């Protein structure tokens, strides 16, 4: 089955569900996924400097710790100057991509965000700017793109309508989320989608649906990480997702999307001390150290017990360098753009 997946990048829904439902193939999946990522990206691991600039959010997603209805959250917003200062420090540490991530906070309107993006590009012309701001109108995405934004991350979280309704409030819709992703792609962004593994009510069939949607969208970046419970949400009594299934899904994603940029997420490192290293060994090729000011890191709590909230940016950077090198890979100091099929010869 894995040989056919390597050769054709395709399995039936039943075969895919069977592969995801057992640990029988885990070792072969990991080895195959690592072989494929090395064929396309070698041993390079791309670093993204993550700046979590606001934990205000207008939405009430049932799984998220910074949801609007969580009154226990201490809210914060970073100023333009604080964001630029984070970028300046990150540039000196070798970062050539900055990821600006926040809740869906109306305070950061197009005028403010476009100004921030254009200033970053003026100051650091050899860097990429990635945005993760949630759902916005197409004209907003266009304005941000015209200001210099290169990439946009918008995880779809689930492609199944029934499952979506169990995770989100009535004010949100899967149709709009998908429309946003298609708008971003049409505008010209490098687009990132993805989903949580082990979220409440999720089935293997849901994961198969997620993969089918990714095959349709063909994003440049795919974020796969375990769901982690937060006590300030309605899902406080649900278990977190498992490391094993998360890694299995990650490997399958690498085999089906050889050229995708796939992060070894902080969530993986939160549920297992060596989770990010295992993510790299299962096909991931991106890590995202935190450049946010230490004083706000603990406040951007999408889930509980997030790692690296007390480390300075330089500590995060060099700790991760040691971890990546120890896992048999190397940090690449460049933008780390997605490679296209013509740019690499992939072993099969």
Image (cartoon, helix red, strand yellow):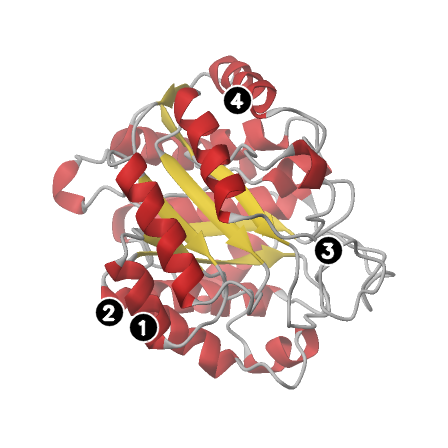
Q: Earlier in the sequence, mark 4 or mark 3?
A: 3
Expressed as whole percent of the image width and height from the top left, the position of residue 76 reads 68, 52
Q: Residue at x 60, y 47 (%)?
A: 246
- On the picture, is 75 further left or further right than 123? right
Q: CA distance from mark 1 to mark 3?
A: 30 Å
**What residue is pinned by disc 3?**
75
Q: Are marks 1 and 3 in contact (CB under 8 Å)?
A: no
Observer-nearest of 59 and 121: 121
* Mark 1 vs mark 3: in front: 3
Q: Are marks 4 and 2 in contact (CB under 8 Å)?
A: no
Q: Secondary structure at mark 3?
A: loop
Q: Secondary structure at mark 1?
A: helix
Q: Residue at x 12, y 43 (%)?
A: 342
**What residue is pinned by disc 2?**
186
Label placed on residue 183: 1
Q: Secondary structure at mark 2?
A: helix
**What residue is pinned by disc 4?**
317
Mark 3, Cα crowd under 10 Å, few <14 / some 14-19 / many 20+, is some
Q: Earlier in the sequence, mark 1 or mark 4?
A: 1
Expressed as whole percent of the image width and height from the top left, the position of residue 17 reads 53, 61
- The correct choice, above or below, for 9 with respect to 180 in the image is above
Expressed as whole percent of the image width and height from the top left, the position of residue 223 reads 48, 50
């Amino acid at each position: 089955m894995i040989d056919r997946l390597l050769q054709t990048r395709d399995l039936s829904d039943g075969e895919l569900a069977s592969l995801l439902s057992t640990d029988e193939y885990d070792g072969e999946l990991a080895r195959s996924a690592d072989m494929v990522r090395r064929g396309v990206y070698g041993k390079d691991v791309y670093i993204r400097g993550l700046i979590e600039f606001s934990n205000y959010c207008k939405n009430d997603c049932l799984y998220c710790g910074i949801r609007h209805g969580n009154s226990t959250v201490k809210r914060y917003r970073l100023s333009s100057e604080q964001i630029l200062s984070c970028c300046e420090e990150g540039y000196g540490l070798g970062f050539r991509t900055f990821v600006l991530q926040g809740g869906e906070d109306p305070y950061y309107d197009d005028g403010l965000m476009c100004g921030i993006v254009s200033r970053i590009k003026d100051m650091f012309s050899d860097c990429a700017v990635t945005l993760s701001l949630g759902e916005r109108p197409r004209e907003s995405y266009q304005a941000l793109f015209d200001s210099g934004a290169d990439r946009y991350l918008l995880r779809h979280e689930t492609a199944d309508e029934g499952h979506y309704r169990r995770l989100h409030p009535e004010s949100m819709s899967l149709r709009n989320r998908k429309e946003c992703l298609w708008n971003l792609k049409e505008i010209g962004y490098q687009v990132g989608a993805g989903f949580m593994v082990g979220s409440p009510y999720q089935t293997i069939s849901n994961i198969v649906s997620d993969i089918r949607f990714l095959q349709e969208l063909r994003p440049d970046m795919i974020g796969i990480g375990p769901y982690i419970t937060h006590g300030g949400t309605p899902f406080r009594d649900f278990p977190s997702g498992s490391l094993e299934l998360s890694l299995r899904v990650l490997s399958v994603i690498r085999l089906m999307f050889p050229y995708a940029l796939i992060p070894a997420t902080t969530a993986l490192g939160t549920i297992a001390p060596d989770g990010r290293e295992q993510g790299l060994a299962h096909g991931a090729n991106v890590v995202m150290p935190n450049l946010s000011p230490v004083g706000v890191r603990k406040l951007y709590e999408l889930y509980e017990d997030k790692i690296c909230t007390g480390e300075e940016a330089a500590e995060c950077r060099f700790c991760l360098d040691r971890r990546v090198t120890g896992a048999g890979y190397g940090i690449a100091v460049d933008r780390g753009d997605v490679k296209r099929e013509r740019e690499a010869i992939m072993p099969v």
